[in-house]
Image (tube, helix red, strand yellow):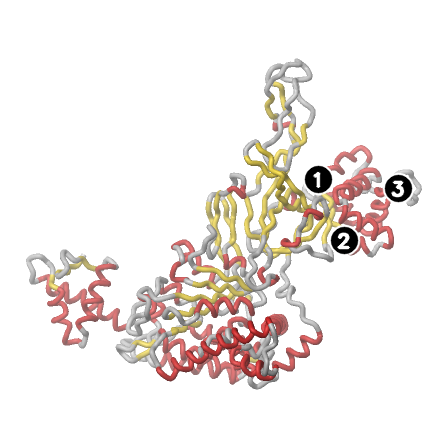
Amino acid sequence: MPFEAEGSQSGSANVTDKAGDWAKFLKKYYVAELGEIGREYSYQNSKKSLVIDYQKLEKWGKKGLGLADELLKNPSKVIGDVKDAVKTYNLIFTKEEEDKADEINIRFVKLPKKTNIRDIRANHINTFISVEGIVRKVTEVRPRLVVGVFRCLNCGTLTQPYAQPTFGSYTEPYRNCTQCERQTKFELVPALSKFVDTQKVRIQESPEGLRGGEQPQTLDVDITDDLVANVSPGDRVVINGILRSFQKTNGSVKSPLFDLYLEANSIEMSEKEFEEVEISEEDEKEIRELSRDPEIYRKFGHSIAPSIYGNEEVKESIALILFGGVMKTLPDGTHLRGDIHMLLVGDPGIAKSQMLRYVIRLAPRGIYTSGKSSTSAGLTATAVKDDFGDGRWTLEAGALVLADMGIAAVDEMDKMDKDDRSSLHEAMEQQSISVAKAGITATLRSRCALLGAANPKLGRFNQYDSISEQVNMPPSLLSRFDLIFLMRDAPNQQLDRAIGEHILKSHEVGELLELNRKAPIENTTEENIKQKLAPVTPEIDPLLFRKYVAYSKRNCIPQMTDEAREILIQYYLDLRGLAADSSKPVPVTARQLEALVRLAEASARVRLSNTVDESDAQRVIKIVDRCLRDVAYDPNTNTFDIDRVETGLTQRKRTLVRDILDTIKKLSENSEKKSATKEDVYNDLAAKNYGKDEVMKAIDDMHRDGLIMMPNKDMVRLL
């Protein structure tokens, strides 16, 4: 097998044709790979692709540059030349086996220049390009007819192999049968025809490469042979291939418009975190200098949506989400997430949505979406049958999968559909999404922080009811958020005045900028304009903010000091100690301690520090304490009760439910109808310091949850 002697005709070093040039290049750099293909192909028929490094080709002198340039302009011819080299010069197979060379795939990787999907034009058709993006949809793998052999139904004669188009229905012979010379019908003979495994993929532009307000554009990709089944929705990939076009039709009418698709030649996985954020030496110097600023936390907080007045603690917490904690994998394979999940719940008109949109501008990787998503994939992922898959099942990624290794900002989470709500549990804690439908079984990655916003069911928040009663989200989902902030719109003359002045100042600044764009304003210096802009101008430029976050996440893996560890554990124990009496509610669980660790690591990353110190621990305790007071404080008992979030039932309400059941049972025993009036139930419980409204509401809730029956509006009975 392998190579002919250098002096032979087929292996001569003096050949001048393109196939000869390729033969010399392959002999110089790819002897081992060619030998491996020959061995595996002969015995397993599995190794069928020769992967050529484009950059290695460029470095192969003047001839290499010429071959590389020709590949970009005329890829089909170049791939044919390489196959000719393999066949003519017996680089893999012997002379007797040379026909096998036609089955070998020639693939090129590591092209230095990428083409943006939105920049693809007509002049790119039939050229070799490299496109980077996120996999949005993936179909099932199915065989496609490449060359068909047909049988005449009249006389049984077989036709010559008939090449088939990539898209559309397959083409049957339209001429008369050459044997019986009659117009007849033909049937496909699968055993003599050639099929290839195919898969269709849709990729979309990465969100971090888009300017504000731009929607990501998509490109369909045709994948064949040993490239199939190698990508999943959410994967970040570089796909190299030949841009093809096909004519659109409307029934039998052909359109002058053509659609584009990429005929994949090779696929490279793009896994490096934040590689798309370029940081120069000047940027690094500026980042290092900023990290030493004692006001660094305040500056980052003020640089998040400065046009929104106040909410400093919320903004500082959002900054910590962007930096995130450290993702860890333990020796037993247990995965500990580093991403921080945060939920903003509050009254309408307090700029929750505006804050979410601003965060996506700052995140190196980010996706903004609504819980009432317009796509079939929703927030997580789904398997659907649509036109894209040509009748095949298609696996489509949702927002959390597309935001992998970044941040997902989800507005109106209270309006999520049931499927999203159930799959979010796994997505938030395990950071993966499992799909099992119509024979498609897949586990997709969703390693992202989740920043959500939700509104109370009745419009305004009531501090006396638990958060799960007021937001259309189950307690099991709420408990997976590290931080939950309540943002109330409570009348306060001093605060209202400050907010009003800030809003008017924002409008004044907008008017000033519009006037200054049209013509310089008289009697106004640049210093005066700068002074007026200050209240609504971020202290850290958004571009520098993005680079700072990316630099920190690349380079900082903070370790916790003993002092910081002791502060966190003591805070946890102090809160747990409040429930030393088993009859008292549980203030916090281990979930809150894990949240403290993630937040403390993020706090250290803000300073570009590799250690979590006491100041980080104190800072995050203050934030978590605020959140616990918002959502876990029971005003009826003046105690912390984490079950207000974890289960939706406080200790007091659980006791009340039990007391109501016992009371109904007691009163029913003396009743012929085996029931009791609601009024009698309350009168019996009044001695236990329950309010009438509290008891009546609990009875209605128990009836709604199926714990008791109500024969009429005034009577209750046990099931």
Amino acid, disc 3: Gly
**Where is mark 2, residue-wise?**
54
Q: Secondary structure at mark 2?
A: helix
Which callout, 1 or 2, points to the residue nearer the camera? 2
Mark positioned earlier in the residue sequence (1 or 3): 3
**Where is mark 1, residue-wise?**
43
- Quadrant into which the N terminus falls: top right
| Image coords of residue 364 (percent x, y) | 59, 67
Left or right: 556 in relation to 595: right
Which callout, 3 or 2, points to the residue nearer the camera? 2
Q: Secondary structure at mark 3?
A: loop
Q: Disc 3, disc 2: CB below 8 Å?
A: no
Q: Disc 1, disc 3: CB below 8 Å?
A: no
Q: What's the CA distance linking mark 1 and mark 3? A: 26 Å
Left or right: 87 in relation to 323: right
Can residue 35 be seen here? The reply is no
Amino acid, disc 1: Tyr
In the image, what residue occupies the spot 69% across and 50% down? 240
Query: Against 597, is 5 above or below?
Result: above
Q: Secondary structure at mark 1?
A: helix
Which callout, 1 or 3, points to the residue nearer the camera? 3
Q: Residues within 10 Å of mark 2 (few under 14, many from 20)?
A: some
Q: What's the CA distance linking mark 1 and mark 2? A: 29 Å
**Where is mark 3, residue-wise?**
11
| Image coords of residue 101 (percent x, y) | 76, 38
Amino acid, disc 2: Tyr
Query: Against 253, is 236 above or below?
Result: below
